Image: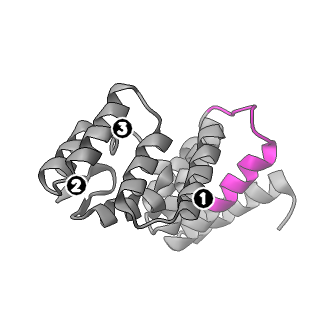
Amino acid sequence: PYEIVRIHRRIYTIEELCYYMCNHLYLIDYTIMNEQLCDWLKEELELEELAENLRQILQQHGSAEQFVVTVLAHSSIYTTAELTQIQNVLEKLKNQKPIEKQKYKADNLLESGAVRQAILIYQSIVYGEEDDSVDRKFYGKVYGCLGAAYGRLFLYEEAAKMYEAAFQICEEE
């Protein structure tokens, strides 16, 4: 299997790789866009053409969008419309501010059950240096998400404090 180190998951097929990529678009970076993946595709799955195409993208410092779409298109399990939709999501992620990408990542981690990892990211946003490029209500939403994450861990006092901070900023329930 190929191990996706960031999430400690092993994959065995091109379909599993595509599923991972589509459901974790915010995590596509050097930890998946690398020579090791190309080697695995070539040696284990015997997808030499795909491996070579991906190596070229890496050598030319291509984008994550290029990399992902190349893999998904090669798999032949996605329609043209689905590929276009995925490209649109990738384009949206590319145009987001770094702090918005962090929140998106934390939101997806929370949704997938990686609550502690999500909390760490939310905390880095709210306790880090304030980013003036985003609206103040953005921070209120992050506090609200942090409250939800604490609630999932049954840390109700911490959750209540985060919800109170969110309310102070956003002034809406």
- Residue found at x 36% / y 37%: 30
Question: Disc 1 to disc 2, how far (Cα)?
Answer: 27 Å
Image spot of residue 114 (x, y percent): 43, 63
Quarter where residue 162 is shown: bottom right
Q: Residue 3, labelled with which disc?
A: 2
Question: Disc 2 to disc 3, how far (Cα)?
Answer: 14 Å
Residue tagged 3: 30
Q: Residue furthest top?
A: 60
Q: Nearer the viewer, residue 123 or 82?
A: 82
Image spot of residue 131 (x, y percent): 69, 33
Image spot of residue 66 (x, y percent): 46, 41
Residue tagged 1: 85
Label 3 is placed on what type of residue?
Tyr
Q: Is residue 35 above or below residue 114?
A: above
Q: Secondary structure at mark 2?
A: strand
Highlighted magenta segment, given as a residue range: 129-145
Q: Nearer the viewer, mark 3 or mark 1?
A: 1
**Lower sequence index among marks 3 and 1:** 3
**Lower sequence index among marks 2 and 3:** 2
